[in-house]
Image (tube, rainbow, N blue to C red):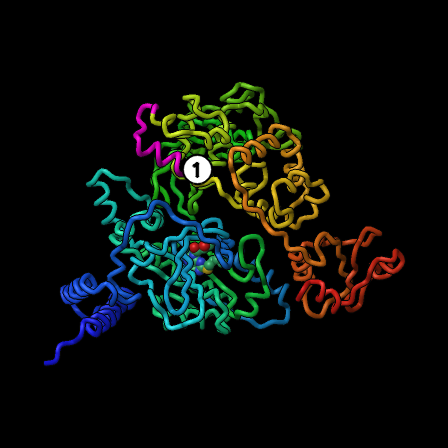
Amino acid sequence: MPEQSPKQRIEKLTKQINELRYRYHVLDDPAVTDEIYDSLTQELVALEVKYPQLKLKNTPTQRVGGEPLDKFEKVAHQNRMLSLNDAFDKQQVRDWQERIQKILPDQKYDYFCELKFDGLAISLRYDKGELKIAATRGDGFTGENVTENIKTVQSVPLSIDIKTPVEIRGEVVMPKDEWKKLNARQEKEGKQLYANTRNAAAGSIRQLDPKITASRNLQYYAYDIITDLGLETHKEVHKKLEELGFRPIKQQKYCKTIDEVFEFYDEVGKLRDKLPFGIDGIVVSVNQAELLKRLGVVGKAPRGMVAFKFPPEQVTTIVEDVLFQVGRTGKITPVAALRPVFVGGTTVSRATLHNEDEIKRLDLKIGDTVVIQRAGDVIPDVVQVLPKLRNGKEKKIVMPRVCPVCKEKLERRAAGKEESVDLFCVNLDCPTKNLRAMEHFVSAFDIYTVGPKILERFKEEGLISDVVDLFSLKVEDIQSLERFGDKSAENIVNSIQGAKKIQLPKFIYALGIPNVGEETAFDLSQRFGSVEAVMDASKEELNSIPNIGGVVTESIFDWFNLKRNKDLVQKLIKVGIKIENVKIKATPLSGKSVVVTGTLDSMSREEAKAAVREAGGDWVSSVSKNTDYVVVGANPGSKYDKAQKLGVKILEEKEFIKLLGR
Ligand code: IVH
């Protein structure tokens, strides 16, 4: 028999093992025993060691995990990774449907329903048919490059049959039985246990050593193709995903009516506990791709999709005490200290009570038996008190008059703000407030090595008094503290120094300006391009940004008006923070105020409003001499006459569309 050349043998083995892997890990239908699979793999490994130059790009052997990394690189997403709006009952789903109906009054559409996997969202980028980059969601704009780890997930195809660039989205999950096995191993080795399958999946992907990830038996379920491949419905998207080699998902349904959607929801609800992986609801999408696109995005979520969640778990327990926590903005939050209970996959011993009004609404006393509820990742809520279980020894909850930390008198408003239901510590030097602000800063800067405990310690030891000091920390400073080894001191300093380069939106977010979350920080960056420009912005300029209302404007303006805050920004820059500024995209509508009157042919009012705002314009409802443009559609109202009288520039729909750059 003629000998196969090593090249030929490697090619054949690679192909054969990949096919077997597909049968085993994607179709759950093994074609051979594990022994045969292992034996073929060993032969391939031996050949690859001997002839490394012949190793193929899609070799199954790379799935065992390569060299450990020092840290995860950042990856900018080509397309923002959005999230979904939640609905918790049928009425909320109907409301969603009605909103869509209003926007698309004459359109026929149907729905596609699928499982909402409880795992970690991962974007996969393929080019020339090969998996190039796998990234976590991160803040939706930038994620972490976890390619080496994802390659160890057997159900992720390393190559697909499309040569042009393609982006796939899906969820990495840990099967329930794997999670149990993993926790048993962790316990035996005295290591940390994972509270639920989602934490376990996330923890397994965020391992710097891909070999650990490889040992965790994760699975990948794809749910979207972001690249436009000309597929007309979401149903077709799923068919395509299967053809490309992703795991088929049995529980999916094409629905003509909302009632059919509800049927699917009820079916899945019954099935939930029997499924091998965790889900927390279903995802309902408008099936037609074109309509889904037209429905656009509201905030962080596509309007044409909704997550129909299963009811959060509820349990009863006892409120043993009420504590008052000081937040980063000085807000005092009452927190119930609970007799520990297991709910939604974790043991909890705290529940938030939000504010004094909430305590009154619940009529809560210390010692009460309560129902608590936990939805997703958030801190649980107390939803109900069971007064019949009282024994008369319950104690009234008294709101504090002074800050529990700095003892300064509390106020009913944040500095300079309107009266509120919340209490605030307005002392600019309150140590806990400052600590919380630092925690927020460090987490926004992704300095993972410095958690709240370490920050507190550094502060207590006098190593730092603000976030600026972090960047001057030396290895020796930390080494000299008790319980800090050389290695960990080095890691800390390296990660702080490594975080000095930062994108503008993250930097702004990190400052912890009240009411400025990641979204607003992003909007500010897009409009102003640099932190200096944001600092110098007038109230009018701030307020003209879509999604930034009066309260947020005041908040930003007041924050930068304080000298200490301006100084903080300057000091951060001086200590070496390099902010990557944003190029402002000027459009003909940037900063212009636009009024629309009459009906437009090509878009609804809602769409026109979104388009104006997206182009940086200001959507206003009445005409004045300060209005820049009045767009006139069919059957215009009195605004048209007023515009003519005031001599405001009038645009026809065509001209308007042109200015929008469409
Ligand atoms: S669709 C538009 N489909 O849920 C962004 N998401 O709450 C949503 N998820 O970040 C993508 N299963 O991590 C979609 N079948 C599914 C999903 C799913 C789980 C996750 C995903 C997303 C989050 C949004």
Q: Is residue 135 left or right of residue 354?
A: left
Magenta span of residues: 480-496
Residue drawn at 32 percent across, 56 percent down: 277
Residue 279 x/y as whole percent:
38, 55
Relative to residue 532, is residue 114 drawn left or right?
left
| Residue displayed at 66% across by 60% down | 611
430 and 423: which is toward the camera: 430
Give the residue furthest to the bottom: 1
**Image-quadrant location for residue 302:** bottom right
Whether residue 20 appears in magenta in the rendering, the answer is no
Residue nearest the viewer, comparing 270 with 54: 54
Quadrant of image for the N terminus:
bottom left
Quadrant of the rendered image containing residue 598: bottom right
In the rendered image of this protein, does residue 275 appear above or below residue 378? below
Q: Nearer the viewer, residue 385 or 72?
A: 72
Relative placement, left or right, of 581 versus 273 is right
- Residue 604 in picture, x, y percent from top left: 68, 64
* Quadrant location, the C terminus: bottom right
**Which residue type carries mark 1?**
Gln
Q: Quadrant of ligand 1?
A: bottom left
Residue 536 x, y percent position in the rendering: 68, 39
Name the residue carrying label 1: 497
* Pointer 1 local density, CA inside 10 Å: few below 14, some 14–19, many at least 20: some
